[in-house]
Structures are given as structure tokens and as C-alpha cells.
Amino acid sequence: MDVTLASILAASTPLIFVVIGETITEKAGVINLSLDGTVLLSAMVGFAGAYESGSVIVGFAAAALVSALAALLVAYSSIALRLNQVAVGFVLFQLTGELSAFLGDPYVRIPGPTVTYRPIPLLEDIPFIGKIFFQHDLIVYGSIVLIFLTYWFMFRTRRGLKLQAIGERPEAAHSRGMPVNRLRYLYAAVGGGLVGIGGAAYSLGAKIGWSEGHTTGLGWIALAIVIFGGWHPYRAAFGVYLFGALQFSAIKLQDVFPDLTQVLGTLPFPIMIFTLVLVYSDRVRSLTDRYPALRGILGSDPPSAIGTRFDVD
Amino acid sequence: MGFELREIHKHFGSVRANNGVNLSVASGELHGLLGENGAGKSTLMKVLSGFHQKTSGEILVDGESIDLRSPADAIEHGIGMLHQDPLVFLPFTVLDNFLIGSPGPERLNRRAAARELATLADRFGFSFDPDTPTRRLTVGERQQLEILRLLWLGARVLILDEPTTGISAPQRLKLFATLKELAAEGMSVVFVSHKLEEVEEICERVTIIRAGTVVGERDLPCPAAELVELMFGGEVEIGERPVVGLGPPRLTVSDLTVRDRMLSVEGFNLEVAEGEVIGFAGLEGSGQRIVLDALSGLRSANGGTITVNGRDLTKVGYRGYLDGGVQFLPAGRLEEGLVAGLTLTEHFVLSSRSGAFLIDWEGALAETVEGIAEYSVKGTPDSTAESLSGGNQQRLLLAMLQDNLEVLLMEHPTRGLDIESAAWVWEQLLRRREDGTAIVFASADLDELLEYSDRILVFFAGGVLAEVDARTSSVDELGHLIGGKVTS
Amino acid sequence: MNFADLWKRSRIGIIAVALALVVGILLLLVAGANPFEALGVIIDGSLGSSIRIGDTLMVWAPLVLAAAGLLITFAAGLWNIGVEGQITFGAIAASLVAREVSGPTWLIVTLALLAGLFGGAFWALLAGLLRTYGKVNEIFGGLGLHFVATALAVYLVLGPWKRAGVASTSGTEPFPRESWLPTVGSTRLSWLAIVVAVASVFGVFYLLRGTRFGLRLKAVGKNMRSAFLLGIPTGPYMLAAFALGGGLAGLAGAIQATGFHHKLVPSISGGYGFLGILVAMLAGYAARWIAPIAFVFAMLAVGSTLLPLKLGLDSSVGGVLQGVLVLFTVLAQGWQSRRRNRADEAALGPPEPPVIPGEVG
Amino acid sequence: GGDSEPVDAEGFTFGMILVGPQNDHGWSQAHYEAGQYVAELTGATMLVQDKVNPADLPEKTVDQVAADLIAEGAQLVFATSDDMRDGVLLAAEQNPDIPMIWSSGDSAWEDGKAFAELDNLGNVMGKMEFGKMIAGCAAGLTTQTGSIGYVGPLVNDETQRLVNSAFLGARYCWEEYRGETSPLEFTVTWIGFWFNIPGFTLDPTQVANEFLDSGADVLISGIDTTEALVEAGKRASEGEAVWAVPYDFEGACAEAPDICLGTPYFNWGPAYLEIVNSVVNDDFKAEWQWNGPDWDNITDNTKTAVGWLSGDGLSSGASSDLDDFISGLADGDINLFTGPLSYQDGSVYLEDGEEATEFQIWYTEQLLEGITGESAGE
Ligand SMILES: Nc1ncnc2c1ncn2[C@@H]1O[C@H](COP(=O)(O)OP(=O)(O)OP(=O)(O)O)[C@@H](O)[C@H]1O
Ligand SMILES: Nc1ncnc2c1ncn2[C@@H]1O[C@H](COP(=O)(O)OP(=O)(O)OP(=O)(O)O)[C@@H](O)[C@H]1O
Ligand SMILES: [Mg+2]
Ligand SMILES: [Mg+2]
């Protein structure tokens, strides 16, 4: 049991970075629909960077850079060019995915550097808990820290409040002296960078190496989990782990439903998205209106200004 | 802290919202800013608070010229503004709203902030639960919160843009007491309103602006009639109105109840005869719009009945009303009337009630050319709706109306139009009235109400405060009534 | 359209194509290939013989159908990203007919195409209902249904429709020959697919240009509130747009199943739904450009499959070029409108529906 | 086959259709390198089209790719996947003058179940059941937990045959060499295709992970790619005692050599060389070839059709037992396809003492009793 949980934790690590990154970007009001492609490209760039330099740090940095650039392009198109974020995001999804295949060809299935296993002394010996949480590599620990750190940043710091403000009501943020569009660029880049780290965390950790289509589909699921997670780091993380658990159970169930295994493997995708139907249904809405305590679990209010642009004057 | 505005111009594209405004307010002064809808009051204040960048002019604080590039600069200089619609973040808690944008160490100390909020609130007799979402605060409470926040940030010039819209009478009293107290402490307060009574009640001086320029400045008290004249451009000659024989009732509303999130209108009754024109007066948000929505089927009535020509339409829904000959022209021409991106011809096709599947473009073009000529729309059949000027958009909307309407409902039918266009629009409307159409319109323009209505209902805070006969009323009387003041 | 207008439009196109070419050439140089040689291979690989022209047209047909269908949903202001799922479900429905119905070719083929049409429409209607009644943004509802349709195809291929003794996602047993779309000569080109695709382009052109329905749909897409006030029942119109757009996508799926693979495979959509979105964007959401742009895309797709063969390049070159082309076109539109002081957004065409997941605008 | 001298085939062109990428370190790369081998020896030109499957190359079917290759001058076409059945049958029918090979198929086997009368379509396959028995033996000799996981591709006669072989080898060595009496756990999980196609198949990385989590310490890969080895290598680097056996390609151990027990691999070169020879010499016959290992030296790549290359992960003790096993197979002392053997559903596969015929081995309808996992059944 603890072994399985540890595996789910490790396998979910990249998606944590992706989902938290996109949550931050969307909190600022920018939706980056290109995730499914940028995760692929950053997985490729991460591996190639680490392979060429011999250092996983270079790999992560290169991946973060590439993915941040993609997110910045979406932000720029919206802020400066007044283009539709969805349209630009979609084109980038296609382009970055194809680029990963094109540029990644020399790196297919060759051994390269990986993140190293670093169990934490003493803690790793705690029964049960030790196996689950303290026998991993640094990037896994990093993902857990990231969840708490993001929560802390968003809800416990001044800058975090500003981040939420610019995505919620930019004109109000502007009237309180925040440089809305500059901050949107900043958080698009930060979120995009985290997405890139997530991509590299696949090719350097959770799913070692590079092959074409290495992470196909996971970007879409990340976008769905962001919504499922109600733009809250804890709930988003819960969504990621739930998805991981569902994927593992699908494998376990091959014996029970032989015809359905492959189908079960893909089901978490629609399940995640159809949870949204429930979350948005009037009945659940009225329930959360009546019992505000439930809103934390069932509510999912998007940042009000998501996907829109803000022009001063 | 005093401030001075010199020759402020603010243009939005071709709209000159402020056209060389001068205004000076001394430290400790409670200064009123009066003007009709669209006069340019909010724009001027947004320039002063750094929200908008002025097109030209100079801003001085304590005699020194300052450069405001953003609201952050304004706050730095001690200028804080409470916007017409309080700019709070609805899903966030009261405390977070208080904190957002405040300077201080990176790590939030909510407990300390809550204490400061409580202390400040105490001073003015306000009270907040710091953990409630702001969404659940009334508009008045949101304002109070914003005022506290601005004071906390060190505002020495406080601008309030129509702070009394949508708040209750006791809250208003509290607000006024607070403002007086602040002025007494040496703060400059600018109070923007079109409510004479309130300005009279608390301000020492008042500046009146119209069409983007200052038309007068007075010490208070000063005769209300004089202020009304300045605001609305004086008594307007009311021409002979044609005597139209009123026919049988067209529209009968009995005991109507409608609600929206902020406001509810209860027990509304109205009977409009064939060929009668009813005007709705009142400040924005006093209930006119939701009644018009209900009368056009856009909002379902929470109680009561609406009949047209004796047919009960209460439950038929918007399209049922359209079929029953009831049509509504809302004020937001590009938001709720025309479709940006579609051409005039396309608009004419959309408005025709033909059921044919294929469009006869040649026929439609001919019709459009005819319509353009008849309604003197400055545009070609290929112009898109958004490229028309406001006046021409309104002409287009009128041209698109069904021919034989039973009831025509309108909101601000001539807002933004020059005198000539406005007169022309009314000519068209009165023609329809002669055909028997019953007209109900809401307007902020008192002259318009007086000139074209038969009867005027004055809305105040969700109820009909008074019904006056337009033939015998005056701008002065209406001005008082709109402000909630019933003169005998 | 006057000359100035025409120049404005084509200037965007020229800048975009030029930039795309520059980037494309750079990428090819990076990959160590002679760009002109690569271009030659792509042209030869897609147009080099009657057979290859046929192959290209067989990619063109479903792509055009998907893009034409998307124009309808775009007109209604909807981002029908679920189009992939609609293709897949249309293909499943057509496969059911092809597997189960026996009779003369004309009968089976007609029924299969109809099944595709209705299957795709049905699947799109689900996304439409989620959008109009479930408040789920069509992007995410559509994606969810896309994954469900794929899962269904995988299930059928591995389960009830599996080959005897085999459980592989590689596909079902080929359909009986009577249910294959008839072809022209020795090519793989099915004239029926071409007829259906051409008809769809004309149909969509006239629907959006010449009918009251199309005009009202545009009004709904550009301003739902005004459209409603003009008396248009916006909910049903949006559903109708989904059904029509999905129906054409379903036809594309039926052609993929009965005219191309001749069996059901899980990846039956061929990605033409997503590609169709790019075609629609590049076409500026105008029906008259769909056919030529889809043809260029089909050329790139088919022609670049020869790159590995002849130049040792990866075949993803075609996809990269497509993406670069669309990206620069979209960006160029933005640059252009930024240069003009007054951004005339309506002319940019793309609907700007609220992207707030779960909120209906 | 595998004993013909290379002809001079300068100017001769053959085409190779691969289902996966040519650098997959597995099935497709083995074919690709065989093609290179032939080209080098004969001077012929090879044209390669890789990733020919509906997910990666939606715009082309196998018959279209064959047509492309022919148009580019190919005088012989190799379609190298079980998955290409429909396309290659169509292509052979449409191009009766072009000899073609469908590797791993049975269309040219007169006694087979799916004989197709096509004069220009032959089949080549290696007797990988030997490779898999050796792989199974290596796993059986190595496992500490007594639990072996097999990452299977899709279910068909061939893959069931290979799983059964691995199982028989593992059980034999587990019991005979190690003297274990407790039953060996042998589980197969199918991903649904020859390699991972996200969204359509299970992710082999996760399957491997799940095996290792649930106590298997040796993974045998039955798929075209190396995820099982990579994942086991990662676990080993974290200090776990786990091993893996990749598949298909001689160089497959490279991604995690330390824990690689060895590779059963296909060596298509000799058979393909012979076919090129026959086409050049104009005596091509559409035959069904099922070529065994060269028992004299199963790593002699000029001769053998299937081989076994031991990896660094194999202990020296296990290594000598494995050599024993291999020589037993070579001289016929060990024939694991001997009854009594039952299928999973309890039906008899081989009566007591019955030795399986080629037909019985090729057309394996189910997994054997003792294996956990899904059979195609029916
Ligand atoms: N952002 C803007 N863009 C374009 N025009 C604007 C903008 N803001 C205001 N205007 C125009 O400037 C003019 C002055 O508007 P302003 O809001 O200052 O009036 P106001 O006096 O505050 O009216 P009210 O009493 O109705 O609030 C109006 O014609 C308005 O339409
Ligand atoms: N988006 C636009 N695209 C093209 N032309 C425009 C656009 N907006 C305005 N115009 C043109 O600019 C001119 C000025 O428009 P504006 O709305 O300022 O007119 P106006 O003087 O206020 O007229 P009115 O009194 O009728 O409102 C008009 O001729 C109008 O057609
Ligand atoms: Mg105002
Ligand atoms: Mg105007």
C-alpha cells in the first residue's frame, strides 16, 4: 500500500508543477491553452538540455525558459495585440507539439542524465510515512513544497493578494496602484516556467527519456484539473493525485474487466471534466450558496477576468 | 491638504469628456460636484485619482504641480477615490479587500490588519465581520470599507463618486457624519452627485459642470432653483404639445413585483392608453430599468399581471411580448440592440419578421437604402453598426422597429444625441404615437421628460415616489423629486 | 470589398507567409536539409502523380468537412474543440452500418454517411447541451466528450468488435468491400468524398451568407444579448450550430472509416478536427478560403510523409510548417490592428466568447 | 535460411515500412538495422518509412506507403509489423509484380489458418519462442520474490505464444535449477498495442511501475520499446533489487545495462539478405519462413534468426545455469512445449507427453494455466 502510494506520488509530480503553474497563470487572468504542446516541448527540451550539458539543472532551466516564452507569447498576444487568448493558445498547442517531435528526433530513447534519488535520512525510516513521502528525488520533494509554497504565497502574502486581484477585477487592481498588465506578464512567465519544469520532470524523472508524444494528453488533463481544483493549490494537488490513483487502478483492473482496461486508462480524463458539470450545476451552486463551508470542496469560481484583457483608458 | 485642477482635458477618442475644467478645493473643505448624467464628473475625478491619464492640463497639490501616472502615484500623494461602483473584489473577504494593494512587509499580518480595521471602523461607528466575503456586503457597506481603506492608506484628499446611490437612509446619515468629521480634521472631500439635497446638506461649496466644462461655482447655501438651472441649462421652453385623443388602455400593469439582486419594486401599477406617452424619471438604479425589463418580458415578474390590449402577457416570455407587439429599445445600443460586426443591411434583414429561409439580398439592399434615407442614417448599407456614430446607431435602431407596435418601451432614447438628432428622434416617436402606439420611456434628461411625456412617474429607491402631470410640472419640481424630496 | 481593403487583407497574409517561410527555412536548415529540396519533395509527394493527387484529396476531404463544420460553430461564437470527438463518433456510427448492414454498395454507403452525419451531430449536441444547460464551457465539455468518444472506439476495437483471437488497438477487421466508398480508377480517391466535401463548403458558404438562419447565427455569435433582444432564440440556435457543425465532422469520420481506413481504428479522426481549427483560423473564418487552405494543409501533410523517405527528415516538418504559418498569420493580424489606432476587432473575425469555464456569457 | 552469400545488388532498391520509429531501441530498429546490413553487404539502396500506424501517420495507410516506396523505385517491400496485415495484403494485390514480405505474418503458410493466395507476398518470422524461453529462464533464475511481471503488447496468437514461452522457461529454471517448489508468480498486463500511444494504450511506464510496486522484481518486456527496462533501472538506482529483460533489439540493454539480464532479439538480416538475393536472382518465391536460432552460436548475426545476448545484470551463477539451459534447448533435451499443458480455462493444450507441432505453437489460442492475465479466449 505504502509502495503504491509512493509511486502515485512520484508519478504525479510533473503534473503538480504543470497544474500549479497554470493555476498561477490563470489566477492572473491569462489562460494558456497551449499546455498539451508546451509540456511536450519542455519535456523534450529538458531532456535535450540535460543530455547536451550533462546537468539536469540546465535541462530544467531550458525547459522552464521555453515554456515561459510560450506563456508570454499568449500574454503578449492578448495584452499588446488584443488577440483572443484561446486562439493563440490553441495554435501554440499545435506548433509546440509538432516542434517537440521535429527537434526531438535525435534524442529519442537514448540514456541521459536523470534526477538523483535522495531519501531523507531519519525521516525515511518512519514506518509507512517514510516510504510514501521521504524516499524520492529532489523534484518530488520540490513538488510537495511547491504546493504549500503556492498556497502560502497566494493567500498569505501581499504579492499573492495582488496576483489574485489582477485576475479577479483588473480595473479595481489598477485603481489600487497595481501595474496590471506588467504583473500579468510576470505571472504568465512564472506559471509558464513551472509548466516547463513539470515537462522536464517527466523526461528527467517520472518518465525518463524522450520519445515522440511522450506526454501527449496530459496538458489537456492539466487544464481540466486546474478547473477541478477551483484555482486553489490544495484542491488542484488533490485533483492531480486523484488522477494518478485512477490511472493506477485502471492497470489493476485489467483482470477484472479485460475488455475495458485501455478504456479505464483514459477515463480519468472525461471523469475529471464531467465533474465540472456537477460542480457548475445549479443544484450544487445553490447548495454552496446555502452552506458556504461546502464551497471550499464543491465550489469552483474562476477568476472573474480570466481570458479577458485589460486596457487602461 | 488642498488641490487645484487647471484646464483639465480628457478625451476618449472623439469624445471630449472633460474640456478645460478648473477646480480648486481647499484643505478641510467639503466640496460638491454637480452635473447631469454624462457631464464628465466621474472622468474628472478619475483623472485626479490617477485612474485615467489626462489629455492635458495641470494638477496641483498644496500648490505644487504633480505628475500622476497611475493610481499608485495618486495614493502616494494622498489622493484616494471611492468609485461610483465601489471597486472591491467580491469573492474576497472584507479583510483581504482591506489589505489588497496596501504597502507593508511581504508577509501578511492579518491579525494586526483586522485590529486596525476594527479600530478605524469603531471610530466612525461602522462594523464589519472581517471574514465575510465582500459579495455579501451591501453597497453602503462596501463604500464604508473603501473609505476606511483609503484613510488607512493615508488619503488626505477623498473623492466620493455618487456615494449615496443604492445605500439606505441610515447609512447615508452615517456617511455624512463621517465626511463632516473628516473635513473637520483638515481633509479635502469632493462629493460628486446629482442630488441637490445632499450637496446642500453637507457641502460648503459646489461646482457645477455640464458637457465637460465648469458652468458655475457657488457657495452654499444657495437657492436650489439656481443650481437646477445651472445643471440642466435653465428652464426650457416647453412647446405646445399636440393634443392627442387618448384611446382605450393599451398596457395595463397591476400589482407588479419585480426583483433583481440589488433592488425590488413592489406593487407597481400603471395604465397606458393608446397614444399616451409615459416618462420614467429617477436616478439610475431606482427601479426604472427592472420595470421596463418586466414590461418587455426580459425579466419575469415575481408577482402581478401585465396585459396588452386585454391579453395577459405576464407569462409568455420575451418572444411572446415581441409577437404581441411590445418592443424595447435599451440604452446600450451596441450592447443590447445592435450587433457589432454586422452591416446595416444585415441588421435590416435581422429585424424583418419574414420567415423565408433564403435571404433576398437585393430586396434587402433596396429596403436598407430606403430605410437609410427615411431615417437619415449617415452610413452605407455596408457600414458595420459599430462604425456609426451614437446618433446614427439610434436612428438605425428606430428604423429597425416593427411597424405597428402596440407598446414601445425605451431607455434614454436620446442619450448622447445632439439637439437636432434628439428632436428628429422624437418626431419619429410621436408619429408612432399618433398611430396609437403606447410609449413608455425612461430618461435622465428632465427637459425631454417634460417635453414629450403626458405623465411622468418619478422613481426613487425602488418605488414610485410621485406621478406628475408633465403639462404642469417643471424641471425644478422634477429635480427635487428625483433627489427624493417631495415638495408640497 | 474595395482595393484598399483587399490590400490590407492580403498584406497580413503576405507578411505572415513570409515570416512563416523564413522560420520554416531556418528550421529546415537546423535539421540539415536543403529547404528548396524539401519543398520540392513536398510538392512532388502530394501532387507528383494522379495517385498522389488522389491521396492528397483524401486528406483534403475530411479536413474540409471538419473546417466547414467549424465555421458554423465559430459563427455562433463557439469554440468547438470537441470536433475531434465528433469525427470519431461519426466514424463509429458509420462503422456500425458498414459492419452490420449488407446490401448493394450505394445503399450501405448512403446509410453509412448518414450514420456519420447523425452520429457527429448527436455527439456535438451533447457538448451543446452541456454548454447551454450545464454551463460547462464548450472547450472543456467538448474535450471531455472527445476523450469519451476515443475511449468508446478503443473499447469497441478491443472488445465487441475485436478480431477473432486478437485484442489490439490496431483496429477492427476490414469492412466488407461493398461498404467501401467507390474510388476513381486505380487511385484511392473516392469521388463521393470529394462531392460531399465540396457540397459542404458551398452549403456552409450559402448557409452563412445567404440564409436567415446563418445571419441570425452570426448575430448570436457576435452579440448574444442583442440577438436575443432581436427575438432570436439563442439557445436553440447554438444547439443547431453544434448539430450542423458536428454533423459535418461526423461525415468526415464516416469518410475516414469507409473511404480511407476501411475499418475502425481508435485514431480514426486523424487529428483533422484540430487541424480544421487551424484551417478555419487561417481562412479568417471565411468559407471561401477553406477549400484552398485545406488543400495546402493536405499537401503539407501528405507531401511531408515523403521527407523521411527522400531526405531522411522527420515527417513532423509538415505539422511544424502548418503551425508556424497559422501562428504568424494570427500574430500579423494583431500587429496590423495595433498599427491602426482604432482596432477594428470585428474585422479580425475570431469570435471572442468568454473563456470563463463554466460561465455562459 | 541465413546461409546465402550476398549478391551484388548495386542499383537495386528495397523499401522498408516500420510501425514505430526507426530508433525505438526495439522491434522497428531491429528491422531497420537488418535493412542496413543488407544494404551494406549487397550495395542495394534502402528506402525507409517509419512510424506507419494510424496514430502517428494518419494521412497514409500501409498500402499507400507501399505505393510511395514503389513509386520511389522500390523493387521489393518489407512490411514489418503484424499490424500491417490489411494494408500489405491490399498492396500485394494491387502490385502483383512487386515482391513483398510481411514479417511475422502467416499469409503465405499453406497449412496456416489465413493462407492468402498471393504469389508476391511472403512471410518471415523468427522462432522467438526460444528467445523468450531463455529470457524467462534468466528471469526465473534471478527473481528473489518469485514474482515476474510481463509487460505485454496486445493479445494475439503471437504474443500469447511468446508469453507462454517466457513462462515455461521461467518455471522450468525456477524449479529445475533453483529447486524451488513454491509456484512462481507470472503475471502479464497488456498495454493494447505494440508501443505506447497516449490515450489509446496503457502507459507502459505505469504498468512497469505497478508491477514493481506489487512485488515483481523481474520485468520481461513484450513490447517494442524499452519502458520496462528504463523504469526498472530507475528503481534500481534507488536501491531496489530489481531487473529487467528487454526485447527485440540486440542493443536494447543500453538504457540500463546494470540491471539488464539480457535481450532476446530478432536478427532479421540473414533472412532479408536471402530474400534480396532471391529477388535480384529472380527466383523469389512467396514462402512462409519461420526461422530458428543458429544453435551453434546464437549470437552469430550472420546466421541466426533469433539470438540471446546476456546482460550485465545476470549473476555468474545464473549465467552458467542459463548456458546449461540453452544447450539443453539446442540439443533437444529440453522441449518445454511438451504435455501435459493446459490453457488458462482448463482446456487441454497438450496431452501428457505430446510435443507441440509448429501449428500448435504458432496458433496459441490462450495463455497457459499458471499465468495471471487476460487471454484472447473464445
Ligand atoms: N472609458 C471611456 N471611454 C470612452 N468614453 C468614455 C469613457 N468614460 C467616460 N466616457 C464618456 O465621457 C463622458 C463623461 O462621462 P462621465 O462618466 O464622466 O459622466 P458623469 O458626469 O460621471 O455621468 P453620470 O452622472 O452618469 O455618472 C460620457 O459621454 C461618457 O460616455
Ligand atoms: N469604430 C469605428 N470605426 C469606424 N468609424 C468610426 C468608428 N467609430 C466612429 N466612427 C466614425 O467617426 C465619426 C465620429 O463618431 P462619433 O461617435 O464621435 O460621432 P458623434 O460626433 O458623437 O456623433 P453623434 O452625435 O451622432 O453621436 C463618425 O463619422 C463615425 O462614423
Ligand atoms: Mg459618473
Ligand atoms: Mg456621439
Image (cartoon, coloured by chain):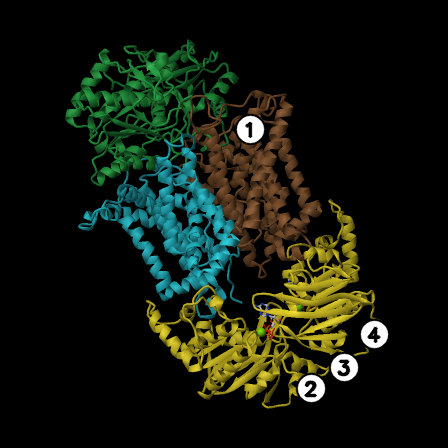
In the rendered view, would you say A79 is above or below B412? above
Q: Does ligand 2 reach within 8 Å of label 1's beta carbon?
A: no
Q: Residues within 10 Å of mark 1 (few under 14, many from 20)?
A: some
Indicate the amino acid at tag 4.
Pro
Q: Is mark 2 on a helix, strand or loop?
A: loop
The answer to which of marks 3 and 2 sits earlier in the sequence is: 3
In the rendered view, would you say A265 is above or below C342? above
Colour of chain B as rendered: yellow
Decide: marks 1, 4 in contact (CB < 8 A)? no
Give the residue pinned by disc 4. Answer: B242
C-alpha separation, residue under disc 2 versus residue under disc 4:
29 Å
Q: Does ligand 1 reach within 8 Å of label 2's beta carbon?
A: no
Per the rendering, the mark at residue B488 is: 2
Tell if the residue under mark 1 belongs to the same chain as the one under mark 4. no
In the rendered view, would you say A234 is above or below A220? below
Task: Name the residue located 52 percent from the left edge and 26 percent from the top edge.
Answer: C263
Q: What element carries label 4?
A: loop
Q: Residues within 10 Å of mark 2 (few under 14, many from 20)?
A: few
Q: Nearer the viewer, residue A126 or A256?
A: A256
Decide: marks 3, 2 in contact (CB < 8 A)? no
C-alpha separation, residue under disc 3 versus residue under disc 1:
79 Å
The answer to which of marks 4 and 3 sits earlier in the sequence is: 4
Q: Where is residue A279 in the image (x, y as percent from the top left)?
A: 47, 52
Tell if the residue under mark 3 belongs to the same chain as the one under mark 1. no
Per the rendering, the mark at residue C96 is: 1
Q: How crowded is mark 4: few (under 14 residues within 10 Å), some or many (20 or more)?
A: few
Q: Where is residue A139 in the image (x, y as percent from the top left)?
A: 29, 49
Indicate the amino acid at tag 3.
Thr
Q: Nearer the viewer, residue B2 or A244?
A: A244
In the image, the chain rendered in brown is C
Give the residue pinned by disc 3. Answer: B472
